[in-house]
Amino acid sequence: MDEKERKQAIYPLSTESLQQNGKTVYYIRSVTSTIFGVSAGILGLESYYGFLFYFGGTAFVSLLMFLLLARGQPTEYFTSAKDIWAGNTLTGLSSFVLTWTLFYGLVDA
Amino acid sequence: MSFVSTTVTVLSLVLLFHAGYSAYEFSHYLKHLTVNSDATLPVDIIAETIVATALFAFGQVLGAKQLEPVSFAKWAKGLEREGKSPFAFLERRPGYMNVTKLREEYASTTK
């Protein structure tokens, strides 16, 4: 047994908690991605600035989740700290682009 | 979703709608009522949009379900406090019943 399996056997993880936390994070990310798209459309952002806005906004949401949800201890609630910073960031990209294009067209009279 | 988080989310959506409509009006005026069209979106609309998005993210994170501890020990501890331990079936096993002890307990309660 290697190091990781040994640790897993001595201190098991609860899969139900992992799934619930994953669902919470996924929901927050997808909902905020759509709103980021709305803002990008309203602000009239184009090409690179728009995607920059998306990644900046996602980083902001990661920071908020780290401070408020995980209370500064991400390993307590996720398998690794990477999950709360970089997990599920690209899944919201399509919702972002959808609302971005929609609202860009709407606001541009 | 708590009261605070719902209020913040609704407020942010109202602000966002207001900013969007203002941006639409601005663009409309720019195109149809002015001659030089190199003006950019006014600063207050930009600020309103950014504040609205930040507030929305804040409201969503506030209203999110509490994260559950991932280590099995802590998760099971939380459950046991409520009485729903995942190993509750081990507390009562018919094959390990001590009948004489149970009889004595019953006798002590009745007499």
Image (cartoon, coloured by chain):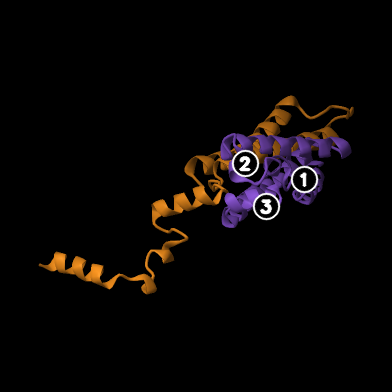
Chain colours: A purple, B orange
| Residue B44, percent from left and from top | 70, 26
| Sequence-wise first label, 3 or 2 | 3
Q: Answer yes or no: are tags 3 and 1 on the same subunit.
A: yes
Q: Give the Cα distance between marks 3 and 2.
A: 17 Å
Q: Which mark is residue A52?
A: none
Q: For mark 2, give the secondary structure.
A: helix
| Residue B74, percent from left and from top | 50, 47
Q: Nearer the viewer, residue B41 or A98?
A: A98
| Sequence-wise first label, 3 or 1 | 3
| Sequence-wise first label, 1 or 2 | 2
Q: Which mark is residue A75?
A: 2
Residue located beneath label 3 in the image: A5
**On what subunit does the disc labeled 2 rest?**
A
Q: For mark 3, give the secondary structure.
A: helix
> In the image, which is nearer the foreground, mark 1 or mark 2?
2
Residue at x-position 24% and y-position 67%? B101
- Disc tally is 3
> How busy is the neighbourhood of tag 1: few (under 14 within 10 Å), some, or many (20 plus)?
many
Residue at x-position 67% and y-position 40%? A81
